[in-house]
Amino acid sequence: MGAPTNFYRTLQVDPRAEDVVIRAAYRALMKQHHPDHGGDATVARALNHAYATLADPIARAAYNRLVRLHSARADAGPRQRPLQGTRSLVEELGEEVFRRFVPDFPEDLVRVFDFTGVLRHSPRHRLWLKRLARGDAADARAFAKAVEAGRLSRPLWGWGSDLFVAVLPSVTPHCRWLLRGPGGPVAKLSYAIALYDLRTGELHAIGRSGELPAFQPFMTALQTARPSASPSEQPNT
């Protein structure tokens, strides 16, 4: 997914800056770049995005972990180049997804999922994304194992929910058995597995998946990026 945007550089502050310094820098820069004062709207949006992350202690901690993770991977050696013509997950799903969910990669699952994030302002609820190249039986089995690993990564005392999404070139019969809705009386303490079809722009989900706190923000982000996106097998509510 490439290097994360340097929010500290955007706000022109040191990564060790205290909250009061970050807030002062943001206000000073917004006075200069706010569109109402003749500034650049693109710069103002970048400042708002950076400040929204760094002003939230949980989001800032998650962002710092992502930066450290990327630096460690870069130091480990050159990464394998993607196949020619392969689009990044951000390009496939749209930037709105990655703005609504703050990156938060469990260190032992970095190479398992393409993206792991917590719902902004509600970090107990997580989104897990993994691109499957073919959608065959082997891909389905591998994704099931990844889901199991993701569920085990949550501390026993840490309540919350998980939405696992397999991103597929097209949904195949090999993967439909993966679909799962939340179990138990409280969706916020459960998980669901959904399938996203890149060809049709449909999110396939079953049961009470729509009750997960991460589901509707993810669905809205998809529809913002791809207006034709729609839920298939919409959960019963």
Image: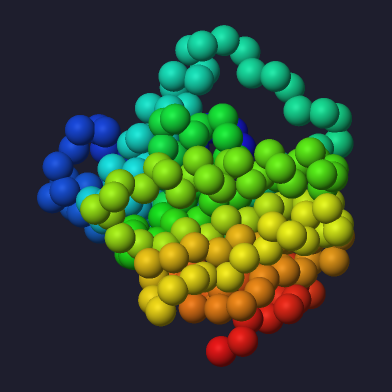
Q: Which residue is situated farthest in the bottom direction here? A: 237
Query: 122 or 11: nearer the eye?
Result: 122
Residue 201 x %, y %:
79, 66
Query: 172 or 40: nearer the eye?
Result: 172
Note whether residue 66 is visible: yes
Who's the residue at 74% across and 60% down the image? Answer: 177
Residue 67 x %, y %:
41, 32
Q: Is residue 111 left or right of residue 232?
A: left
Who's the residue at 41% across and 79% down the image? Answer: 185
Q: How many marks can you see? A: 0
Note whether residue 230 is visible: no
Query: 43 or 188: nearer the eye?
Result: 188
Please tell me whether residue 68 is drawn above or below residue 93 in the rendered image.
Answer: above
Q: In which quarter of the image is the C terminus?
A: bottom right
Residue 98 x %, y %:
53, 54
Who's the residue at 34% across and 58% down the image? Answer: 123
Quarter of the figure with residue 203: bottom right
Please tell me whether residue 169 is drawn above or below residue 15 in the rendered image.
Answer: below
Quarter of the figure with residue 206: bottom right
Q: In this view, does 42 lie to the left or right of 135?
A: left
Q: Is residue 85 left or right of residue 140?
A: right
